Structures are given as C-alpha cells and as structure tokens.
Image: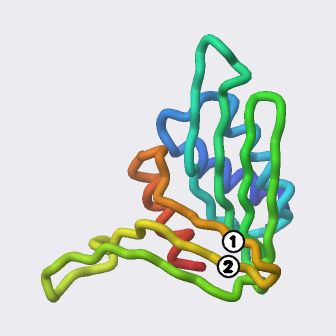
C-alpha cells in the first residue's frame, strides 16, 4: 500500500471521529504523510477550540508506528512533530484499572496512563484522552496496548 492509499485509509478513520473541526483532519493527514509508514495507530489527546481567537485553536495527537512514537501538536498555522524511536524505550510503566470481579474481558480494562523512559533520559507520559468520543477512546486503548 502506497503512502497516498495509507493516508486515505487513516483519513477515513479520522473522519469517523465525530465532533472534529474541519481544520483538524487536513493537519492530521500532513502528519500521517510525514510518518511514511504503512501501519499507523493514532488518537487525539486533546483539542481546544476558540471561535473568537483563532490562534487559540490547537490539538495534540499521538501516533504509533512500527518504529516510532510520534507526538504532534498543531494549531491553524503551525505543526510541531516530535519523533522518538521505539527501540530507545528502556522502561514502560502502565497504570491500569481492572474490575474487582474475578472474570473480566479486555474491554473491562482501562488504561490511566503509560509512562515511557527513553535511553537518553527523556520521558513521556501518555494519559487517557481529554477528547472523549467512543472511537477516540478505542484508538487510545489500541495504541497504548501496543507499546
């Protein structure tokens, strides 16, 4: 699958998330193209919308590819992409909530946060998204479970 076909597939997933302003999918597609990967997981961490002061509009997103964890923050006029190699992760700490009952299934597990420490001392904590839609929460759970 070429990069253009990949972007179309990922964009379909992006457009499936309800409540996104029109400017978000276009910027996400730029970031997806920048990954150059054929298998991309993503979720929207947070989105802020200000109808009066357009410069206050911003969004933060995490992407996971086979080789990298990518954190992107963007507004209407800028995009900042921070890439870290997955091979540089030396510690993974996941905080989960599981039901008290003895028998439960994967959907019953909730991820509170995932804290990563990288080989050069940098760290990153991925929290549950503030942008709460059913699909985005599902995307978050899928991404953090693959780390």
Q: How is the image coloured?
A: rainbow
Q: Which residue is mark 2?
A: 117
Find the residue positioned furthest to the top: 52
In this image, 25 relative to 46: left or right? right
Count the marks: 2
Q: Position of residue 126 (x, y in %)?
A: 56, 64
Please report contact status of discs 2 and 1: CB closer than 8 Å, yes or no. Answer: yes
Establish if 63 lies above or below 20: below
Point 82% across, 47% down: residue: 80
Point 67% across, 15% down: residue: 53
> Where residue 3 is drawn, which disc sits there?
none
Q: Which residue is mark 1?
A: 123
Name the one closer to the observer, 125 or 32.
125
Q: Residues within 10 Å of mark 1 (few under 14, many from 20)?
A: some
Q: Position of residue 45 (x, y in %)?
A: 56, 51
In this image, 89 relative to 80: left or right? left
Name the one closer to the observer, 71 or 25.
71
Q: Position of residue 89 (x, y in %)?
A: 71, 83
Q: Earlier in the sequence, mark 2 or mark 1?
A: 2
């Amino acid at each position: 699958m070429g990069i253009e076909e990949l972007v179309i597939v990922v964009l379909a997933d992006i457009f499936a998330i309800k409540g996104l302003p029109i400017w978000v999918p276009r910027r996400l597609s730029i970031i997806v193209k920048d990954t150059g990967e054929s298998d991309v997981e993503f979720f929207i961490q947070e989105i802020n919308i200000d109808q009066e002061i357009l410069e206050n509009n911003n969004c933060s997103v995490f992407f996971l590819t086979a080789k990298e964890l990518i954190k992107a923050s963007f507004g209407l006029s800028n995009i900042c992409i921070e890439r870290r190699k997955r091979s540089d992760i030396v510690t993974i700490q996941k905080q989960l909530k599981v039901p008290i009952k003895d028998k439960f299934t994967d959907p019953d597990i909730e991820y509170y946060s995932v804290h990563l420490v990288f080989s050069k001392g940098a760290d990153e904590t991925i929290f549950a998204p503030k942008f709460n839609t059913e699909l985005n929460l599902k995307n978050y759970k899928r991404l953090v479970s693959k780390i």
